[in-house]
Image (spheres, rainbow, N blue to C red):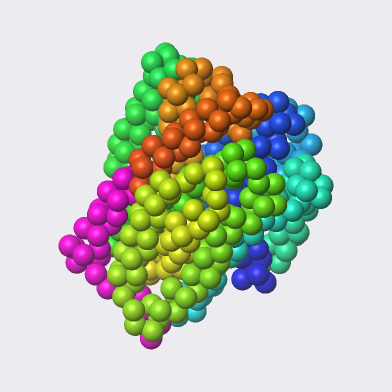
């Protein structure tokens, strides 16, 4: 039961990211909201996922990997159920945070269950399947949710997800238990990490609304910076730190972690924000927008197994991941050709490039990284990997939103108007609508250029870690 239960949970967690992006315009219209409050529906999920994954991984090692998985799946289902019946955006955002906490436990405890249940080539294949199912979730999420919205409305789509999550929780009770009896939880480090990440996320998402010089925003960045410094100090001095020193000191392991962070940054901004552009500017229905997004997500369904097979047949994993990162960079920069007319045709090749890069990373990163850590740290390492992914996803959503709103505000000279346009609420009729579309498109271009530049810098850092240090050499493959 381990493999099907864990993989189904992984797929559902991934669907909750990509699918919710399709639902945002409908949620905003129904609940009468826009701007940061609406963006928290996705960002809150990712924030909770990022903040709690490392905690969940360490807790799984200590309390039992099956136990944490079951509890997490129950939270996952409860969050979806409340989201389906949320009367206000505030209730919905809170429920999404609960689902994010559940997703963190599902991913971290699920990865630890696979790592403890398989060895050698079988472990490589298990993690390749995990990457594939994450790809399945991301790939079918937009299309599935788009179809469900057309049939049942956005509330019905979340209700379906709640039922599936409940089935995962029931199935997980049949799994074998495993734990590290000597594991200890770093509560101080966990608290500091959550505080730091939450403060930075809050400042990024609320900055465009309050203004970047507003005391609340400055305080958010300040708390985040102090929290991060305190977290680093706590990790250096703690008896049982969340980030085991031997993991941080392993440049090969950190190289793989940085690679997955880079692909997440290059993928998530497009995944979350392009559907709104497609529906608001290009006139696509939710179903049509979901179909266009298959250009981005379908490669994530196919590439993981192909990449893992290539590594098992002797292809260098380091060369493969560098190729994937280059594809992500090129794809993001190529999205500068985005225009209101013939949008699907214009973005087809860039979306495919980004999707292939992301899928390749999914297929080999976890297996390569986990092969470099001792068995007693499997849960912590799995939590660390997924925390980096979640943190990157949460921050890129917040950063992309802030950048898009910032550029739109400079074009429209009105923060409220900019928030409405970013949420897909355009003014009917020319010439105002045409002006809003032009501002939206230009703001997208500037934001996308920044994402491409950041991915390029991170790609160079990954190359340095993998090719200039003894710890970065050598690939784990089937023998």
Can residue 188 be seen by looking at this rendering?
A: no
Asked if residue 422 lies in the magenta stretch, the reply is no
Question: Residue at 71% of width from left, 37% of height from top?
Answer: 26
171 or 87, which lies in front?
87
Q: Quadrant of the C terminus?
A: bottom left
Q: Note whether 128 is above or below 66 in the view shown.
A: below
Question: Residue at 65% of width from left, 27% of height from top?
Answer: 429
110 or 359, which lies in front?
359
Q: Is residue 175 left or right of residue 170?
A: left
Q: How far from the left and from the top, in percent, is residue 141?
A: 64, 55
Q: Is residue 206 left or right of residue 86?
A: left
Which residue is at the far front? 431
Question: Residue at 72% of width from left, 44% of height from top?
Answer: 80
Q: Note whether 85 is above or below 318 in the view shown.
A: above
Q: Which residues are magenta?
A: 453-479
Which residue is at the far right? 152
Q: Is residue 151 left or right of residue 98?
A: right
Q: Quadrant of the N terminus?
A: bottom right
Q: How far from the left and from the top, in percent, is residue 79?
A: 70, 42
Tally the marks: 0
288 or 362, which lies in front?
288
Q: How far from the left and from the top, in percent, is residue 342?
A: 55, 50
Can residue 473 be seen by looking at this rendering?
A: yes
Asked if residue 465 lies in the magenta stretch, the reply is yes
Magenta: main secondary structure: helix
Question: Residue at 69% of width from left, 47% of height from top?
Answer: 286
**Which of the 4 image quadrants contains residue 84?**
top right
Q: Note whether 289 is above or below 96 in the view shown.
A: below
Q: How far from the left and from the top, in percent, is residue 243?
A: 37, 49
């Amino acid at each position: 039961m381990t493999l099907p239960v864990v993989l189904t949970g992984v797929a559902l967690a991934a669907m909750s990211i990509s699918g919710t992006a399709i639902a945002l315009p409908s949620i905003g219209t129904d609940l009468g909201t826009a701007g940061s409050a609406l963006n928290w529906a996705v960002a809150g999920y990712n924030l909770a996922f990022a903040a709690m994954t490392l905690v969940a991984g360490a807790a799984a090692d200590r309390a039992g990997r099956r136990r944490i998985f079951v509890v997490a799946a129950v939270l996952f289902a409860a969050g979806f159920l409340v989201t389906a019946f949320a009367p206000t955006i505030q209730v919905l955002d809170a429920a999404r945070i609960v689902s994010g906490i559940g997703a963190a436990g599902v991913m971290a405890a699920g990865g630890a269950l696979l790592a403890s249940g398989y060895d050698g080539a079988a472990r490589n294949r298990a993690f390749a399947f995990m990457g594939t199912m994450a790809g399945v979730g991301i790939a079918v999420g937009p299309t599935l949710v788009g179809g469900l919205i057309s049939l049942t409305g956005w509330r019905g789509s979340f209700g379906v997800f709640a039922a599936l999550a409940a089935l995962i929780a029931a199935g997980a009770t049949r799994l074998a238990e495993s734990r590290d009896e000597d594991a200890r939880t770093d509560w101080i480090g966990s608290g500091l990490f959550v505080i730091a990440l939450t403060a930075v996320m809050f400042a990024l998402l609320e900055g465009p609304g309050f203004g970047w010089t507003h005391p609340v925003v400055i305080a958010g960045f300040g708390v985040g910076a102090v929290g991060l410094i305190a977290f680093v100090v706590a990790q250096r001095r703690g008896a049982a730190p969340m980030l085991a020193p031997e993991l941080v000191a392993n440049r090969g392991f950190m190289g793989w972690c940085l690679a997955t962070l880079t692909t997440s940054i290059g993928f998530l901004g497009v995944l979350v924000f392009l559907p709104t552009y497609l529906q608001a500017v290009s006139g696509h229905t939710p179903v049509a927008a979901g179909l266009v997004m298959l250009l981005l997500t379908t490669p994530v369904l196919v590439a993981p197994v192909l990449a893992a097979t290539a590594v098992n047949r002797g292809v260098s994993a380091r060369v493969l991941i560098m190729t994937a990162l280059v594809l992500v960079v090129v794809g993001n920069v190529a999205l500068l050709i985005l225009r209101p007319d013939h949008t699907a045709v214009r973005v087809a090749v860039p979306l495919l490039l980004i999707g292939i890069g992301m899928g390749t990373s999914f297929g080999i990163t976890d297996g390569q990284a986990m092969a470099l850590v001792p068995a007693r740290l499997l849960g912590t390492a799995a939590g660390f990997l997924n925390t980096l992914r979640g943190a990157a996803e949460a921050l890129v959503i917040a950063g992309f939103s802030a950048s898009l709103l910032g550029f739109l505000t400079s074009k429209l000279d009105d923060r409220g108007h900019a928030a409405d346009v970013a949420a897909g609420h355009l003014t009917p009729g020319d010439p105002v609508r045409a002006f809003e579309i032009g501002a939206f498109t230009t703001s997208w271009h500037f934001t996308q250029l920044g994402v491409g530049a950041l991915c390029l810098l991170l790609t160079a850092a990954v190359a340095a870690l993998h090719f200039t240090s003894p710890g970065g050499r050598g690939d784990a493959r089937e023998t």
